Image (cartoon, rainbow, N blue to C red):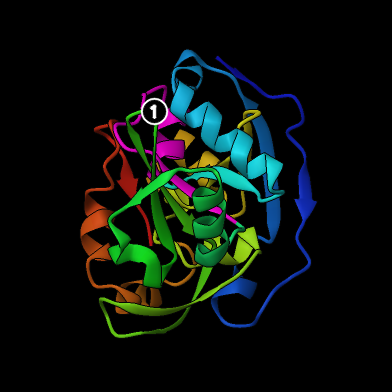
Amino acid sequence: MQSVLYPWHRQVLRCSWSRLCLLKRYLFTMKLQSPEFQSLFTEGLKSLTELFAKENHELRIAGGAVRDLLNGVKPQDVDFATTATPTQMKEMFQSAGIRMINNKGEKHGTITARLHEENFEVTTLRIDVTTDGRHAEVEFTTDWQKDAERRDLTINSMFLGFDGTLFDYFNGYADLKNKKVRFVGHAKQRIQEDYLRILRYFRPGIVLSDLTTEK
């Protein structure tokens, strides 16, 4: 069940010219309370959220997992985004005696922590500084909208807080409900940044079989 407690729009003032000023600069929020969402709260996730809250770092569910939950589907994989830098996360996990595994993603902001026999992949909010069609040089940020701007599709650019609050900067929720697949910003620019995005455009990983694609 999705409970819309405050479906208002708040204008986001930040806007850099190019593709961003062509987008609707509004943040849409609502509350999600569903059995699929509640089922994510394992002992490991509870410990993870408590640790980030204790250290005053924001942590949210990101990307495809949010899309799946809004579709009433429990996600197979859950990615997390945070305002904490990789260095801050490492220090935090080390101080708490939490084991970290697979450090290959650290350069791009990803730290994987193991709590209660579960792996949790947490990535720092980031901005793409340069891209070559497959890989990107990134810069870390604490701005959630900036991170959303660099994502491929509107339906993959949403975040979900652990109180059930949805953060949607680019009408991803409306697109999902209207069964539309759209890029964030200009499609050509999005594809040039990462050519694999064209595959995600035609196969976004959504359960719905009758989605329409739109530039």
Looking at the rendered image, the quarter that the C terminus falls into is: bottom left
- Residue 178 makes an appearance in the image: no
Where is residue 64 shown, x and y percent of the image?
38, 43
> In the rendering, at what x and y percent does residue 51 appear?
60, 39
Residue in the image at 36% along x and 24% along y:
74
Quadrant occupied by the N terminus = top right
From which residue to which does the magenta span run? 64-82
Residue 166: which quarter of the image? top right
User: How many circles with numbers are drawn on the protein?
Assistant: 1
Q: Quadrant of residue 39?
A: top left
Query: Which amino acid, mark 1?
Result: His
Residue at x 56%, y 43% (from the top left corner):
60
The stretch drawn in magenta includes residue 65:
yes
Q: Position of residue 14 (x, y in %)?
A: 74, 70
Q: Is residue 178 above or below residue 33?
A: below
| Residue under the point 72% across and 49% down | 56
Report whether residue 190 is seen.
Answer: yes
Residue in the foreground of this view, choosing between 179 and 150: 150
Q: Is residue 117 left or right of residue 36?
A: left
Reply yes or no: does residue 153 show up in magenta.
no
Q: Is disc 1 surrounded by few (<14), some (14 to 19) or many (20+) residues within 10 Å? A: few
Where in the figure is residue 88, as x and y percent of width and height?
58, 61
Residue drawn 32% across and 62% down?
A: 103
Q: Nearer the viewer, residue 88 or 166?
A: 88
Q: Please say if 17 is above or below 33.
A: below
Residue at mark 1? 116
Q: Quadrant of residue 47?
A: top right
Task: Please tell me whether mark 1 sits on a helix, a strand or a loop.
Answer: loop
